[in-house]
Amino acid sequence: MSGTFIKVLKKIGNVPGRLLDYVDLARCAVRALPHRATVKASFAGSVPLEDARKVAVLNHYDQRGVVHDYVVYFAAKLAEAGYAVIFASNCPKLSETETAKVLPHVAWVLKRRNIGWDFGAFKDAIALIPNPGSLDHLLITNDSIYGPLHDIDQVVGEADPKLAGVWGLTDSWDRHFHLQSYFLIFHQAVLQHPSFGKFWNAVRYYRRKHWVIRDYEIGLTRFFLRAGIHCRALLPYRSMVSEISGPIDAAATNATGHVSKYLRHMQMAITNGWPLNQTHYFWDYLITYKHCPFIKRDLLQRNPVSIPQLQRWEEVVHASSDYDTNLILRHLQLSMRNRVH
C-alpha cells in the first residue's frame, strides 16, 4: 500500500484518524521486512560477542549521523561494566569517522534503515546474539538518556532475578502499566523462556511511533506479564508518589506564580491517580534521593511539561555524581533552539 494513497486520503479530509492508522498498519504489515533488508551494514568492534555473559543493545539515532560524546561515554561505561555492546544505529547516514568513535567499546555496529524505531533496532541486534539463553542477562537501552551518573553494575545489581525476570529502571501507568523501555533488563530465565523469542519474532518494523508505543513499549510488559513473568521497576512510580507527595504539599503552600501552578497540578494528579511521567516531574528527586543513573534527554531539550527551575539540572547532577556535565552541555549546544539550559 503506497504512501501516495495515504496522502490522498489525508487530502480528501473527513477521513477518521483511526482509519488512517489502520491503513498505515496494513502498509507496515506488508512491509514487515526481514532482517537482511533492514540492516544496511555491520562492523565487528573490539569486544568479542561470542561467549559473552552479558550483552547490551544500545540504539542510536541522530538525524545528521553524529555519534555524540555522551553516547560514546555511555557505550564505554557499558563495556567497562563487562557488556558486549551491540550498537544499533538508525541514522540515515553514519560515516566511518563517526562509526570509529564507538568501535573500541562495542562488539558490533549495525547500520540500519530508519524503520521500526528502537524496537526494530532491538530486534535486529538481538538476532546477532548466537544464543540469548546462555547469557546471564540482556540489557536493552537507547540514547534518549544522559548518563550513567553512577556505576552500571551497581544499578543492575539491584535487579534481583529472584523477584522478577524483566526489570526496568522506571515504570509508567499511562494507558496501561508498563516498564519504560529506555532501560530494560532480561534475566536468564526469561531469555530461556519461549515467550522471549515469540515476542521479538513478532515485532514488526512500524513506521509510526504511536504503534510502537502501544504494541511494544506498553505491549512488552503486558505480553510478559500474561506469560507469567514478573516485571518490576527499580524506581516504581507508586513508591515515588508515596515519598514525594508530602514534600510537594509543603512546597505548594509557600510557592507563588508558575511554581505554585506547577506544584498544584502535581498535587491534583497525584490525588486523582492521574499518572505522571516521573522521569520529567520527579527528575531532581530521582537523581538527588534515589541515585537515578540517568536524566532524560527530551526533558532538557524540550521540557514538554514546562517544569520550572529546570536550569538547575547541572547543579543537581554535580551534587550527586562526578559525571562530566560537559557531555550533556555539548549535545544541547548542538541540538537546541530558542531555549537556554
Image (tube, helix red, strand yellow):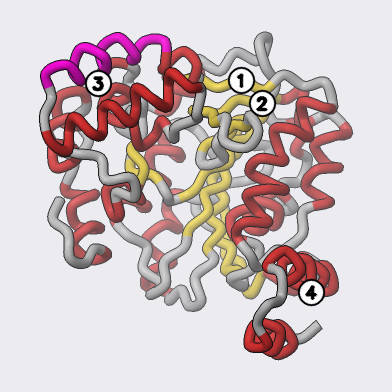
Up the image or down, 50 lies above or below 222; here it is below
In terms of image quadrants, where is residue 257? top left
Q: Are marks 1 and 3 in contact (CB under 8 Å)?
A: no
Q: Are marks 1 and 2 in contact (CB under 8 Å)?
A: yes
Q: Nearer the viewer, residue 176 or 55?
A: 176
Q: Residue at x 18, y 52 (%)?
A: 329
Marker disc for residue 27 = 4
Circle 1 crowding by C-alpha within 10 Å: few under 14, some 14–19, many from 20: many
Marker disc for residue 288 = 3
The CA span between labels 4 and 3 is: 46 Å
Q: Are marks 4 and 1 in contact (CB under 8 Å)?
A: no
Q: Secondary structure at mark 4?
A: helix
Q: Are marks 4 and 3 in contact (CB under 8 Å)?
A: no
Relative to 73, is 328 on the left or the right? left
Judged by depth in the image, the label closer to the viewer, 4 or 1, is 4
The CA span between labels 2 and 4 is: 32 Å
In terms of image quadrants, where is residue 244? top left
Amino acid carrying mark 4 in the image: Arg
In this figure, which residue is indicated by the disc labeled 1?
Answer: 232
Up the image or down, 324 lies above or below 253; here it is below
Closer to the chain start, of discs 1 and 2, is: 2
What x and y, as percent, mark residue 211?
68, 56
Up the image or down, 174 lies above or below 253; here it is below
The CA span between labels 1 and 2 is: 7 Å
The CA span between labels 3 and 2 is: 25 Å
Circle 3 crowding by C-alpha within 10 Å: few under 14, some 14–19, many from 20: some
Q: Secondary structure at mark 2?
A: strand
In this figure, which residue is indicated by the disc labeled 2?
Answer: 166
Q: Which residues are magenta?
A: 242-254
Q: Residue at x 48, y 58 (%)?
A: 60
